[in-house]
Image (tube, coloured by chain):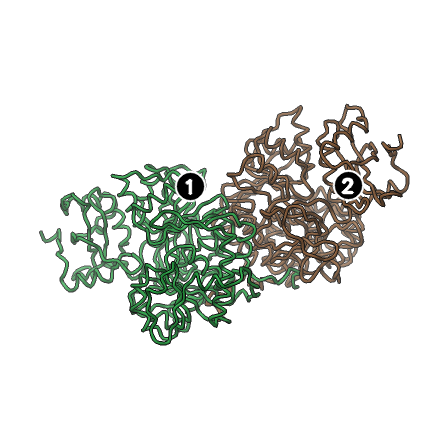
Chain colours: A brown, B green
Amino acid sequence: MRSTMMPEQLNISTILQFGSTVHSDAVVTTWTAEGPRKISFGDLGKRAAQLAHALRSLGIDGDQRVATFQWNNSEHMEAYLAIPSMGAVLHPLNIRLFPDQVEFVANHAEDKVVIVDPSLIPLLQPLLPRFSTVEHVIVTGGAADTLEAPEGMTVHDYEALLAAQPTEFDWPEVDENSGAAMAYTSGTTGDPKGVVYSHRSIYLHSMQVCMSDGMDISLDDNVLAIVPMFHAMSWGLPYAAFMVGASLLMPERFLQPEPLAAMIASERPTLAAAVPTIWMALDAYSVDHPVDMSSFRAVVVGGSSCPPELIRKFKEHYGINIIHAWGMTETSPIGTLSRPKADLPEEKQFQLRTTQGRFLAGVKARIVDDAGNEQPWDGESVGELQVRGPWITGSYYKVDATDSFDDGWLRTGDVGYVRPEGFLQLTDRAKDIIKSGGEWISSVEVENYLLEHPAVAEAAVVGVPDPKWDERPLATIVVKEGIPDPDVEELRAHLAERMAKWQVPERFAFVDEIPKTSVGKLDKKRIRASHSEGQLEVINALES
Amino acid sequence: MRSTMMPEQLNISTILQFGSTVHSDAVVTTWTAEGPRKISFGDLGKRAAQLAHALRSLGIDGDQRVATFQWNNSEHMEAYLAIPSMGAVLHPLNIRLFPDQVEFVANHAEDKVVIVDPSLIPLLQPLLPRFSTVEHVIVTGGAADTLEAPEGMTVHDYEALLAAQPTEFDWPEVDENSGAAMAYTSGTTGDPKGVVYSHRSIYLHSMQVCMSDGMDISLDDNVLAIVPMFHAMSWGLPYAAFMVGASLLMPERFLQPEPLAAMIASERPTLAAAVPTIWMALDAYSVDHPVDMSSFRAVVVGGSSCPPELIRKFKEHYGINIIHAWGMTETSPIGTLSRPKADLPEEKQFQLRTTQGRFLAGVKARIVDDAGNEQPWDGESVGELQVRGPWITGSYYKVDATDSFDDGWLRTGDVGYVRPEGFLQLTDRAKDIIKSGGEWISSVEVENYLLEHPAVAEAAVVGVPDPKWDERPLATIVVKEGIPDPDVEELRAHLAERMAKWQVPERFAFVDEIPKTSVGKLDKKRIRASHSEGQLEVINALES
């Protein structure tokens, strides 16, 4: 029996038209060296129409890919809205990928146009001759004459291009399952792999993000989107905010504690989203500088596991609940959010906040062990997390990646367990788990306990070969400034109070810096390589 | 360019499985003569599986219609979850329709099974012989032996039927566009018309209802669903609450002020939804009885226009914001909700709260005048409201109703205007508008102003023939208990302070009762009929 409902499509153009009319007074604020620069959603809608006309004039008449090489700013927001709405595909290039990777993804996606910010021209310029399909480069901020076009490419000034265009556009009705935007994983092994989000997946994800049990975003919010728009779609914040008329605060390239503190004080955002390191840096900065975070109703932390210490500190020092989130480029990205029931005892709430959180209503999940058996949600049975849902990828663009899927489920490569209340606790990346004498040690757990020690600023734990146990943990540690390296036995005693004795590492290395991936995660592959090449000075407590 | 996203369907079974696992501790509380009766979402999920097995055993193996004839209670909730999830179509029969209409809709939908509550057997029993397709009647509450099955029907005891069944069910993957539930309009002219909601439309509507800018429902809520589950799907509350783990408080047949006050005091709901008359009655009851509404964070009012006086009173006396809503059976039903931005001045917020509210993100709207011209959203240009969207019907079940649609838009039959901020202000039903000398008078506006007079308990204003002006307003008024009929000139003076002089009625009739439709709306058709038959004692101020 067919329903009688209208066959109405879920489209980005609906978000654009709705947000720019019903919420025309909401504002996108872009931070600049001179302070805030503001534009209303109403005017943004007009400029998005102008951008769409401009792109049509450059030959974008179908589902060609239009890339961006931009910070979080209002021009990037215009691209987010105009490109999918006109039926083309938005491809935000991750400026932090290694040059070879940027070259690979731009050519793999067959980008026709790139929009670039002035401050990123030095990064883009040497890459342009390596882009094989790009025909047009559009430069924002009036800096077009500082970019040299290689043979076969035309350079345009963003404002000049827009100024000539009408402020209304007859947005086409697009099939909701067609591609709206692309993002590539920053995989540490092999080439980056592309995910193509649909209009439908983005629309549903935006709704979910605005649900009370999502990030609860409403027209009363001013959302500080620190997580880059070139990284997992800024966790869905731009579209979600536009859908409900929440104002947006865009930090541009000013991601250091000092300007962040200034823009928070000036614009008083109610919600912010960023990786843990941003918050650790801001917290460290607050020791000697005034940081007023009183405007936040909550702060969303994801991208990598948030240390419980940070969650406790934000609650105790700032009165702010950290909402811990888990997701991946492949999951649009939000898969879980830690929002415990408000009537639970405080310590229980805290425990749940340290987990990755509860699955969103649209996300189906299962835990599968090495033998392929689905595990119960009992708060202890560990296995790989696999997920399914309408905003989760079921394949990769132009690549056969059957290993990434299991009977219709996405294999996340993350290992953990689920509590009976549906809260996910990740213990490791599958490839980072330490297999010691047939038992598993969670590298993340050891790192979190190390971070509770007063001398430890950063910690990364990897498995290294061991003749007796196959693998044993090696803890690499950055000590806080001005504090001498702690005694290894003291660190081991600290850990022994918190975990099983056999899980406590005997190998330690004090380092100046822990290598990070292009998106700021601990690069454990490089740490393992450094160790195997003998570049780390390892103290072994059992041999000393 | 196709997206790489999974082709995952939006299904009621997802809501059922998600709610009964991740939110297994949430509770449905049914009010009874003995007080509250509770069941967890986890147990409800098991009983829904049992009900699905039981229905399979009665031959429900496809998209047959399974009707309910029930109050809001946990057994009705089981039917809501089980029937669509198993691939059948839920058809809640409106117990307040006239018997001929109930007969019509049950036969038109070809219902195969009816589930009935004990207290409703007296109402259903005489109808059963008139049902031409029903084969099974299932009686809840252990009262099966009080119902006499007509020839060809079998009577079953609900609990006995469930007890024999397994508590798990292998829910089928259903195409999201297939029918999940049916509802019939209670049209005052012609036969009721059927709307078939899809899995997709219900899923999207549930998400929207839980968005911060919807009803903001979360796992911290306990939702008092006064609006009946047999009327416009209880405004979507049952599915929305189950999706996010909000507990539900079901009033069963106890809709009078006394038991409502008792259940509110006992269960402390955080949100409630009902038509205005429920709140007026509760407010009147509070004069002589204790009514503690302090647990409410908000109250949703819809079904008919909410008098501004009630909105002001709830804010001033109880500190509760009334969220005014507009919708129809055809719109799933939520189309608008009045939630002004929190930083607006209080009086501006109040003004916006008296409107029907802002369109939800998924609802496209336009105002079209008599000549078919789309009107601007300028806060004054009046016309018929037309809407489009993924949870709005595009046709009626087995009926050609092209008059109800205009180029893909649903004609709502409601007349009003839209403010620039996207807030809808309805002024009348198209058929109730009073056309006086070529100008329009809003009957609802006159009613609202009359209700601000201290002597007026109820008011209904209709257009009656006038030799000079074609039509003039007639105000029928129920005066508050213990107060003498006010002077007509005093009422006219009261109105003249609030509206244009030519809009002020000269005809008044003081009545004991205002006739209501089967769903409790003012029955203006009957008032006009009474007037034309000379049954109303009309005072004409111009003739006295």
Asked if badges 2 and 1 are on one and the same chain, I answer: no
Residue type of the residue flagged with mark 1:
Arg
Q: Position of residue B441 (x, y in %)?
A: 26, 54
Quadrant of the snapshot with the C terminus of chain A: top right
Q: Is residue B386 above or below residue A291?
A: below
Q: Is residue A357 left or right of residue A118?
A: left
Q: Residue at x 69, y 32 (%)?
A: A281
Residue A516 is marked as 2
Q: Position of residue B371 (x, y in %)?
A: 36, 64
Q: Which is more toward the observer, A148 or B443?
A: B443
Residue B297 is marked as 1
Q: Is residue A420 left or right of residue A136?
A: left
Residue type of the residue flagged with mark 2:
Lys
Farthest residue, direction left: B544
Q: Position of residue A410 (x, y in %)?
A: 68, 57
Q: Which is more toward the observer, A525 or B368?
A: A525
Q: CA distance from mark 2 to mark 1?
A: 46 Å
Q: Residue at x 32, y 46 (%)?
A: B259
Residue A58 seen in the current view: yes
Chain assignment, label 2: A
Q: Is residue A403 above or below residue B226?
A: below
Residue A170 seen in the current view: no
Question: Tag 1's secondary structure?
Answer: loop
Examine the image and state in which quarter residue A305 appears. Answer: top right
Examine the image and state in which quarter residue A190 appears. Answer: bottom right
Farthest residue, direction right: A534
Residue A286 is marked as none
Q: Which is more toward the observer, A241 or A421?
A: A421
Q: Which is more toward the observer, A316 or A55?
A: A316
